[in-house]
Image (cartoon, rainbow, N blue to C red):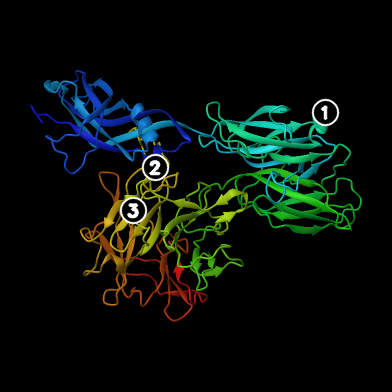
Amino acid sequence: MTNGLARSYFRMRTANLWSTDKVISSSTFRIKNSWSWSCTAKPVELWRTAAIGSSTTWNNRPTRREKMDTVNDAKGWSSSCPAGNLAFDVTKGAKDAAANEWNTITLELAASNESDVYGWKRFDAKTASLSTTYNTRPKVPSGLDTYPVSTNNEYGCGDKAPYKYIGNTDFYLRAKVTDSDNGSVKAVFHLWPTGHRDDSLIIDKTVSVSSGTVASLKVSKALLAQHAATAGGNFSWKVKADDGSLSSDWNPTLGAPGCRFVFDADRASTPPTITSALFPDGSDGWPVTTGSVRQKGTFALGAAGVSDIVAYDWWTDTDTTRRNVKNSSAGGSASIDFTPTVAGANQMYVQSLDPAGNRSDTAVYLFYAKGVAKPDTAGDLNGDGNADLWAIDGSDTLHRYYGAGDGTVTDATSTASNSTWPAAQITHRGDWTGDGYEDLVALRPAAGTDPARLWMHPNNGFGFACTNCAGGVVRQELKVYDQANNHWSSGAKQILAVGDLDGGLDTDGDGVEDVPGHPDLMVNDGKFIWLYYGAPDNYLDSYRDPVLLAGPDDPISYEGTPIKDVTLAAPGDFTGDGVDDLVVRYEPADTTGLYVFHGNINEWGEYDTSLSERTVLSWDWGIGAKPLITAAPDADNNGVFDMWATTPGSGRLRYYADFTAQGPTDPVTASDSFAGYRSIG
């Protein structure tokens, strides 16, 4: 305002900086200076203050805590100094927020000289952003083992008995090391005679590899022979990851027993051989050419010159089921087929057997699989390009139904989980783990004094929803930093995965995406409908508070239908305007309408819908006529929105294709296997 006085206050989210695995190096507050009184640079200050609230007024301004930075600039007066961002150093404020676990920090913009009219500036509030640079501590190494003879047992790397033997051979220590910041990471290996780490450490070496790959360190039989007498041939080892600044914990953890094996120089070592043309040996790193996930590879198993071998047992780190294959003649080879589902490092284990059932040492074969070329399409669970669905039957068993590309679905030959799903709600749309597969989100009901909890179950690439799968693939809880943002702990009417509605974030206004997009989630708590923006740390308020989409004061109701009596579905971009839309079904028998609400992105970059912008799709979609519904969203791959719905009093799932403002085509039977099912998604 001319000859006026103003200060601006901003409450910025900092809860996502709390992680003890993040060490902040810098933090910047940016905001667009849209107008100044001239192109003459004038200073503007940024202060950290006490919190703002409903009682904040000019006469009750928040107390200043400390000055963050001063910027001397002017933008927006003319083409000589066009509008643009001002950047303030708030590193100390970000570090304090992380150390003290503040949900937010409040920042004040004020002219250094509030009596100088040329110091007055106008700012575009919606461009305000806080971007923080940090180094992430490397993850604790995983997949510890020895090669070519594996010394792992049923408990892991051998830190618990029974301990495995290594015969008179050189071998390698191995571990997968990963840094969330990618780049190169070091594996630090320690090996010592068991019980003598402090006085007889015989290996302290570092191996550098690319993040996410397996580091290998050679151990010679001659070195072990020199120290075998110290602990009766027993040796222990550990490994940690280091990025040059930060280190992970040791694995096994500091103070715990190390991985352990017994070295016997008088014992012959003849593990079987393993080769594959499609998935070649990865001992020297990621091969130039290798196969992909979901691609079946043939592996040849050989007897390594042992003449009486008649069979082989084999398993992998991602599928621990032991399988047996017989060779055609004693001492001969055999072949097996295996389809990897995990991108990156994979390990296959093989033992050879003689006619008496005696087992060889365990051979371990490291190979790498490329990830999917592009993320699976919406609704697809197994990578065939067709929309599929998950469903829970009356016995609380989770099923995976594969789509045929024509709207029909078929139950897979095995269930989609080894767990039971009593009273759980399920939904899926989007890849929460970054592997290109669509994952399952489930709301587990409250039990006793425990609240309802929201979980993400990784898809193994073929629709198996992992709770605790081999290879460390486990479910992840979806949480909030601020418990006031938890609108499901007391249960919810519905959860709905909707994919990535807002895309990635451009934190510095340069038109380039700085933070990749992530799937989002809606929660209907029975009174309000909330939109949560997903984040890689699985905290649903990491970047933003949830957005209120509908409630008593901002309804989506039809003729007074309350929020508790609507069902939502995710159709994708029905209107073709580049923004995903939202389907709303009114459940009561006297309404029964099915509408699509046109999605839009408001000036604050938030997704929104409006009663004034919706299209009726069909009638007779009440809960009595169609108990369970879900969006395919495109089951026949023709680019037009489709839905599935169950039929009351029968096991029939119907397919409704090609919705327009005139409704869908006539329904067809998708399956007759849904009797007693209580959830689909």
On-image quarter of the N terminus: top left
Q: Which mark is residue 531?
A: 3
Q: Earlier in the sequence, mark 2 or mark 1?
A: 1
Circle 3 or circle 1, nearest the eye: 1
Q: Earlier in the sequence, mark 3 or mark 1?
A: 1
| Outermost residue to the top | 40
Q: Quadrant of residue 656?
A: bottom left
Q: Nearer the viewer, residue 659 or 492?
A: 492
| Outermost residue to the left | 3
Image position of 448 with respect to 468: above or below: below
Q: Quadrant of residue 80?
A: top left
Residue at disc 3, secondary structure: strand
Mark-to-mark CA distance, 3 and 1 = 64 Å
Residue 403 appears in the figure: no
Q: Nearer the viewer, residue 627 or 513?
A: 627
Locate residue 600 relative to residue 112 in the image: left or right. right
Locate residue 216 relative to residue 418 in the image: left or right. right
Q: What type is the residue that disc 1 sits on?
A: Gln
Q: Nearer the viewer, residue 109 or 212?
A: 109
List the residue tagged with mark 1. Answer: 226
> x, y percentage for residue 236?
72, 37
Q: What type is the residue that disc 3 sits on?
A: Leu
Circle 2 or circle 1, nearest the eye: 1
Circle 2 or circle 3, nearest the eye: 3
On-image quarter of the C terminus: bottom left
Mark-to-mark CA distance, 2 and 3 = 16 Å
> x, y percentage for residue 259?
69, 40
List the residue tagged with mark 2. Answer: 504
Image position of 205 with respect to 250: above or below: above
Mark-to-mark CA distance, 2 and 1 = 57 Å
> Could you tell me if the residues under marks 2 and 1 are in contact, i.e. CB atoms within 8 Å?
no
Residue at disc 2, secondary structure: loop
